[in-house]
Image (tube, rainbow, N blue to C red):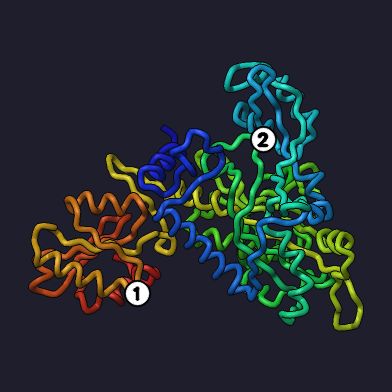
Amino acid sequence: MSRYDDVVNLAVRRSLFYPASEIYSTAPAGMYDYGPFGTTIKRKIVDLWRKQLVQKENFLEIDGALIMPEDVFKASGHLGNFNDPMTQCVKCNTVHRADKLLEENSKDQYREAMPVAELTAALRILKLNCPKCKGELSDVRQFNMMIKSEIGVVSKVPTYLRMETCQSIFLDWDRLVKTMRVKLPKGVAQYGTVFRNEISPRQTLLRLVELHQMETEVFFDPKEIDVIERWDEVKHYKVNVLRVGQHAESLTTEQLVKEKIVSGKLIAYYLAREQQFFELLGLPLEKMRFRELDDTERAFYAKEGWDFEVETSTGWRELSANNYRTDYDLKRHGEGSKKDLSFLREDGSRFIPHVWEISIGVDRTFFTALELAYRQEGERTWLSLPPSLAPIQAGVFPLLSNKPELVIKAKEVYESLRDCYDVMYDGTGSIGKRYARLDEIGVPFCITVDFDSLAKNDVTIRARDSGKQQRVKIAELQDTLYKLITGKMNL
């Protein structure tokens, strides 16, 4: 089996995630539920994003509606442009996403924004047929992925489920400016669910109908794109970039600006902050890159675009879209709503703010973090997650579950820690099986109460990755665990 399959099997076996409504044969593809440990890991990814890319940057956070009127998406341009290329089997009528079908059957990369005529030609050159029944495939055509709904009983209002979290940010901008004493540049962030009528959902969390995003829109004055208050913190930090037609390279943010690889300091700054965020998730720096999008790949609203990608067992996987949206969104929504969405400069002039977008896919990030943390040696399997993502920070065990004195002591230790840390008590099965269960979900430390603990008032702490163990006094356990979790100490 592939590493991807190993991770999926582990996830289902340990209820990290699994198909939604799975007891019904009519359940649609592309929707997944997160189990208890998976929910915690996902929440911790979002919490880390909130800390690093919202709170530390002094951004505002909103929680917008999932359903919006049709006029919003007319103004935004999505009704006519939010498309994916599809091809359909003329024999069994199965629909396939053309660019993904081509990538799965060749070593080349095919982008969703490529002209349909080019994608059709590629299908014919490769002589591809329907993977399901080997029937002939139709010419490629564009398919709008938005999901329509109707609100109302008598007079029905046409609406759509949101397909990205950014539109409510643009719609709320005017109110935020008036009520939150906004000074530019200012980021507005949102985490939430979005819906896309994916042509052929597959690869579990990687291509979903119902998915989650961590989105930030940074509003700024284009005349001050190079005015960044905390620039010195990142100007020597190196960002991995792959420019169109060139090889990947690691350049400082200062180089990105001086060589005009990006439009300004603001963009280089947030590329650096985003890469630092993914480093904190435990993703190896050498497997990351920002890939520049050419004119045929960029979204219809973007002047400049960089996809953040990570190398995995299934190839380079896009986790985040980063786009310079200029004043497109506020200008279009101002026209559509007939509202003045301009911003007042200190000199009394007005202008429409420009926007830099950081849109991170939570589900893809979750799966990629699991896959790159997956380890296997012989019969032992574990997730080498950083402590900040682990669903449980430590497990507490009695060495033997049939010895009441050990059980009582272990539960005392557990109770002393549970108010400060995410800990779990486990007294079932052999100590080896208990270690293995927690290793598989990425728990970094296990605390064992043995017979020496009764006499010496200490415990054994075991590290997940190295297997090293150390005796620690129970009176010092809280402080020691804190140092281990935060990396101030190693076993």
Q: Residue at x 67, y 50 (%)?
A: 307
Across and down, in percent, residue 64 comes to 66, 64
Identify the mark at residue 109; answer none if there is no mark: 2
Q: In the rendered structure, which disc, 1 or 2, sits on the residue that comes first in sequence?
A: 2
**In the foreground, 14 or 288:** 14
Residue 295, above or below 65: above
Callout 2: helix, strand or loop? Answer: loop
Q: Residues within 10 Å of mark 1 (few under 14, many from 20)?
A: few
Q: Which mark is residue 420?
A: 1
* Residue 305 vs residue 488, the one in the foreground: 305
Depth order, front residue of 264/421: 421
Can residue 289 be seen by looking at this rendering? no
Task: Name the side, left or right, on which 104 lies relative to 352.
Answer: left
> Of 438 and 381, which appears nearest the observer?
438
> What is the quadrant of residue 295 in the picture?
top right
Residue 427, given in percent of the width and then of the height, sits at 19, 58
- Position of residue 49 measured from the top left corner of the image (x, y, whole percent): 56, 64
Badge 2 amino acid:
Gln
Between circles 1 and 2, the one closer to the viewer is 1
Q: Quadrant of the C terminus?
A: bottom left
Q: In the image, what residue occupies the spot 16% across and 62% down? A: 398
Q: Residue at x 70, y 27 (%)?
A: 87
Look at the image and tell me in which quarter the N terminus lies.
top left
Residue name at image x 67 percent, y 49 percent: 291
State left or right for residue 31 relative to residue 463.
Answer: right
Quarter of the rendering containing residue 12: top left
